Image (tube, rainbow, N blue to C red):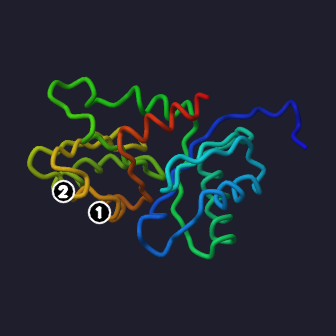
Amino acid sequence: MRNPHQTVDVFIALLRGINLGGHKTIRMEQLRACFEGLGFRKVRTYVQSGNVVFEAQKELTTRLSEKIGKCILSEFGFPVSTVVRSAQEMEQVVRGNPFVKQRGIDTSKLHITFLSGPAPKAAARELAPLAADLEQFHLKDREIYLYCPNGYGRTKLSNNAIEKKLGFEATTRNWKSVNALLALARE
């Protein structure tokens, strides 16, 4: 039973690489059950690729990421990188997107890469050689805003490349999904 004096917050978990044609397949009802087994409430999923909105006792998102990762490994038998943001943090991420204010930006070509930790000061210099042609990126703490006019599938600014360059776990969502997750978190 939950203590009525505990502070509850809404969180968004972003799981990397599940249900994308590989061996990491999880049915959404099983994923929701895993989260509920951790004591999380009002667990909801968005699309089939590992986006979960839930309520939990207020705590550090890194601890929540660890708990979720351990549960998935235990329940499903494989590790999954998990990045968690509070609804408030996601609100700041959406408001802070520098590309939506630029003329000529096609919002269907916007993506956000979520990092498991703050980007180091040298991150922009490390990532710059990966940006091709008209691609742009902007680092802001634990997020990398991406504009990939030729499509995310063609960019060298992929999760794998970013993880290799920066040494952090990363997962990317398109702008539409980020906004949909924030709307779900606000419900």
User: Is residue 59 positioned above or below 179 on the image?
Assistant: below
Mark 2 and mark 1 lie on one chain; the one further toward the N terminus is 2
- Give the residue type that dot 1 points to: Ala
Instruction: Name the residue tied to disc 1.
Output: 161
Q: Quadrant of residue 56?
A: top right
Q: Position of residue 24 (x, y in %)?
A: 51, 71
Mark 1 residue element:
helix
Left or right of 2? Residue 152 is left
CB under 8 Å between discs 2 and 1: yes
Residue at 49% over, 50% down = 47
Report the residue at 52% width, 31% height from top: 183
Where is residue 138 shown, x and y percent of the image? Answer: 27, 39
Q: Which residue is mark 2?
A: 130
- The image position of residue 128, as x and y in percent, is 18, 51
Question: Looking at this rendering, what residue extends furthest in the left direction?
Answer: 133
73 or 22, nearer to the observer: 22
Q: Is residue 48 left or right of residue 96?
A: right
Quarter of the picture containing the C terminus is top right
Front-most of residues 59 and 120 = 59
